[in-house]
Image (cartoon, grey):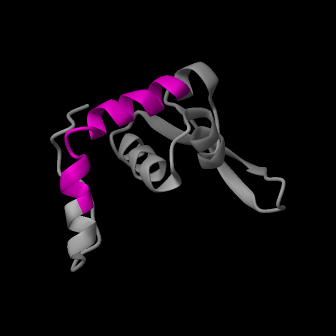
Amino acid sequence: MNGQAALPFAPGSRTSAEAAMAIVSRVGGLRAKLLGWLIANGPATDRQMQDGLFMDGSTQRPRRIELERLGFIVAVDEVRQDNGRRATRWGVKG
């Protein structure tokens, strides 16, 4: 998991590009933290990961997407949340 890989950002948004550049040095560690948490506690929804890691959704979701694109995690199933909406549970690819 190379933290120096290009990070996605909203095209045309200077603030989004600046945020991506600011976090690039930490992203490898954040991915590792998320993956480690999923290994120990998963499968889990985005909300469960955020709560378990005390990580903001705007930090957690992009790391989860990166881990999925890299092939480390996969969608396992869907569950109904307390608010009645469905959510995908993610788990480590086995």
In percent of width and height, residue 19 lies at: 26, 59
Horizontal placement of 17 versus 31: left or right?
A: left
84 vs 54, nearest the viewer: 54
- Residue 83 higher or lower than 74, as above or below: below
State how many labels appear. 0
In percent of width and height, residue 53 lies at: 55, 34
Horizontal placement of 68 versus 1: left or right?
A: right
Horizontal placement of 15 versus 30: left or right?
A: left
Question: Which quadrant of the figure has residue 31?
Answer: top left
25 vs 44, nearest the viewer: 25
Question: Which quadrant of the figure has residue 48?
Answer: top right
Q: Residue at x 51, y 50 (%)?
A: 56
Q: Is 26 colored magenta in this rendering?
A: yes
Furthest toward the bottom, the residue is: 12
Q: Residue at x 26, y 48 (%)?
A: 23
In percent of width and height, residue 64 lies at: 45, 45
Horizontal placement of 18 versus 51: left or right?
A: left
Residue range (magenta) = 19-37
- Residue 3 higher or lower than 22, as above or below: above
